[in-house]
Image: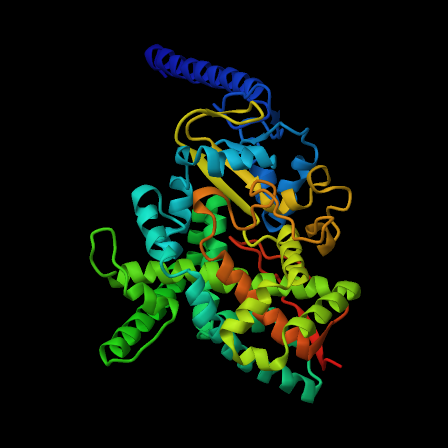
Amino acid sequence: MSMTSFTTDNKIFKSFGFAGSAAAVALTYLTLKYNDRVVFDAPRPNTVHKKGLPLVGSTFSLLANLEEINHFYSMPLKLLVRKRCNTISAVGLPRGVQSIDPLNIEHVLKHNFENYVKGVLFHNSTVHLLGHGIFNANGAQWRYQRKAASLIFNVKNFRDHFTDVFVKELVLVQGIFNNAIENKSVVDFHEIMYKFTLDSFVPFAESFDELQKNSFDRFMNFMEPVNRKFSEIFMPWKPTVASHQKVIDEFANSVIQKRRAQLAAGEVHKDLLSRFMETTNENGEPLNDKELRDTIMNFIIAGRDTTAQTLSWLLYNVMLHPEVEEKLVQEIRTHVPEELEQDSPALYEAIKDMKYAYAVLYETLRLHPSVPVNQKQALKDDILPDGTPLKSGDVFIWSTYSLGRNKEIWGDDAKEFKPERWFTEEGDLKRESQGKWPAFHAGPRVCLGQNLATLEALVAVCVLLKRYKFSLVPNQNVTYQVSLTLPMKYGLKVTIDPRA
């Protein structure tokens, strides 16, 4: 080997050695500087930071706890001193600022509403399911959709039409329960409630649920694209996100085309889809098929899922608390004689006066909120009521699930199911602030369908508990499935007897 080549090789080795040393020094420096958060995430003074690993922050603990995400969010929040926030740093996610302070929640959702939006990450994670519907829209697009929907969700429709629809749908449910009594068989109440709130084809329901879980995974898990591609290559027999989306789109389009044909033939329908077909978009034009598809998906997740889940969690808690069941059944028998079920306006008025039923429902939503974790992204820098600063692009995260179980906010009995907490000393129903009880969101985006969902749930409670005694099948694991909403992971197995 010539001296020249030796010298050249030596220079190369020295260059590599220098580069390696420099990289090691840089890595050491970054590790020390960002020893508990994602690299280049700036420290946030005067906040409680959820300590993570150097350079990656809480990424791995977040991924490891995805299946128990609501409890994961509750853990640091238990340690929060009131008027302070908890920040979280994870790869692939904007800087998160967590809080369960009702004043902070009201500030973001109500008082400084214009500064907080769903955000690009949320939109991209859910657009395959929700499209550009009301839950995924911002600004002028959202305002117009909400205005159109508000014309449908009114008292007259509730009283004269929707109550009657709910009672008729429950006739089918009663047939299932009567058959279970006759055969002494176990039924999955959770599954049946899904059928009550949306009578649909099984393939559609399965695909819809899978896309919901995938939306949550896309939002929380930066490895989701890698996992999805791995599954497509090495497990080609498994249904893909694309195949689930195809099922949903085909179902929605078939429903739309069928209803268009029915209306063109002079048939009269008063369901939500038909009512939305009578509205126009922001350009004054009738909604096209894509806009109707997005509308269907948004209101299915709002109506079918949340109501079915709430009814399931309500029955679960009632079965665990016989004293609550006794009071509730007595109120139902007092206010809803059987003949009243055939008179929709009268039934609507009777349910409005059932204070204990409302308290049971509100208590269910306190412990088992329809949307357990939610977030908004800041457009501009802001300061929360407790003094916590938010930077533009930060995501404000609040866990309604954690909030409802926090002893400092709800008292030492926060984790207990006690409908009585919803009564004043005078016996009237309490009205908690939207920040303390954001079960139906808060501010301008408060749930338009909350009265419809409440009515649907209470009609079902009245009709079913008056007729049937439900008993929890022992030794089953009743817990939640991680999703955008709060479904039961393994269902709710019950046996049924006629109510004495």
Q: Going 61% across and 61% down the picture, which residue do you hit?
A: 489
Give the quadrant of the C terminus: bottom right
What is the x, y in percent for residue 114?
Answer: 39, 35
Residue at image position (50%, 77%) is: 169
Q: Is residue 457 left or right of residue 288?
A: right
- Image coords of residue 166 (percent x, y): 50, 73
Q: Report the number of discs.
A: 0
The quarter in which the N terminus is drawn is top left
Residue 137 drawn at (x, y percent): 35, 47
Q: Residue furthest front?
A: 426
Query: Tell me, what colour scheme is on the image?
Result: rainbow
Q: In percent of the image, x 53 and y 55: which residue is there?
A: 485
Residue 464 to residue 132: above or below: below
Q: Furthest-bottom residue in view? A: 182
Please name whichever residue, 119 or 147, is drawn nearer the observer in this view of the structure.
Answer: 147
Residue 458, percent from left and from top: 59, 66
Whether residue 320 is visible: yes
Residue at position x 32%, y 63% in the image: 276
Which residue is nearer to you in this view: 137 or 481? 137
**Vertical comparison of 19 with 462: above or below:** above
